Each structure stands twice: as C-alpha cells, then as structure tokens.
Image: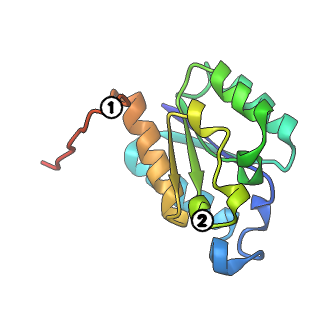
Amino acid sequence: MKILVLHGVNLNLLGQREKAIYGQATLDDINSGLRELAGQLGVELECRQSNHEGQLVDWLQQAPGQYAAVVFNPGAYTHYSIALRDAIAAIAIPVIEVHLSNIYAREDFRHRSVLAPVAAGQISGMGVLSYRLGLLAAVELVRGGRNDGEEKCITAD
C-alpha cells in the first residue's frame, strides 16, 4: 500500500514561521517521522509540497491507481479553494485533511474548511501528531476500517 502526503502553501517554511502556532518542527522533520511510522505500519509513503494550487490539483487527480489514500494539509487553501475541493470530490480514494493548528480556535476566516465536506475526515490542532493520526486514519480506512460514524475499537493482542 502506498500513501501520498501532500503539504500545501507555506508549509515549506515550517520551523521558521510563526513557531507559536505551528511549532518548531520543519517539513523535513514531519516527513521523516511519517516515513518512520509508515515503515512500522508496513506501508510506502511519498511526501510532496507545493505552494501552487494547480500543482496540488494535478497531484490529487493523479493519485488514484498510484496511491491508496492521501493525507493532505492544504494550508490556507483550506478556506477557499474550490478547485482543491472539486479535485478531492472527483477521486475515489480517501483524503484525510490535517492541520497542525486548531483552525477552529484561530481567526474567524479559518473556521471554515471548504474541503472537509468531501474529505474522509479532518484532524486539526494536534501539531505534528495531526499528521501521524492522519496517516493512521488513512491506513485504517484502506485496510477496511469504517467511515460511517460507527465506533470501532482497536485492541492490541
């Protein structure tokens, strides 16, 4: 199983910008941690970042057939990109929307995600853990987990 991780606009500046909001971790730190977790889960991972909306749309459209799911932090595009929303709606693989910060505890314009209604799920406000949880969710959905509101308990043997 291959999972695509997409990082959107300005995420290349992680570790430099607004550390009080986004933390100290760089994009390389996040990707390294995700690759380690992917190895533990037995999945392949590809990580990409772009500041260009059209490039993100292209990668989403190309994902089916190459990847089983997408973990996606669209950055500021979350709040207004109908193009990304339509690309997510058009593909038949799960997309998990993730955010480092709690978008609902920030400025009013950040409280609305135009992507959430077409994403398989959304995780926000957990810092780097948001990405890790997003990857776990993507793998679980692909391996047969449910996404219909029914609770599922996972236990360790």
Is 55 situated left or right of 125 in this image?
right
Give the vertical position of 71 relative to 30 (above or below): above
Report x, y in % for residue 134. Answer: 49, 48
Q: Residue flagged by tag 2: what amino acid is it? A: Ser
Picture residue at 67% right of the left edge, 19% below the top: 90
Q: Secondary structure at mark 1?
A: loop
Count neighbours of disc 2 (C-alpha within 10 A) and say few if under 14, some if 14 to 19, many if 20 or more: some
Is 86 situated left or right of 141 in this image?
right
Q: Which residue is mark 2?
A: 101
Q: Which mark is residue 66?
A: none
Image quadrant assignment for residue 127: bottom right
Q: Which residue is mark 1?
A: 145
Give the vertical position of 133 relative to 114 (above or below): below
Picture residue at 85% right of the left edge, 50% below the top: 51
Q: Residue flagged by tag 1: what amino acid is it? A: Gly
Report x, y in % for residue 149. Answer: 33, 33
Q: CA distance from mark 1 to mark 2?
A: 26 Å
Q: Secondary structure at mark 2?
A: loop
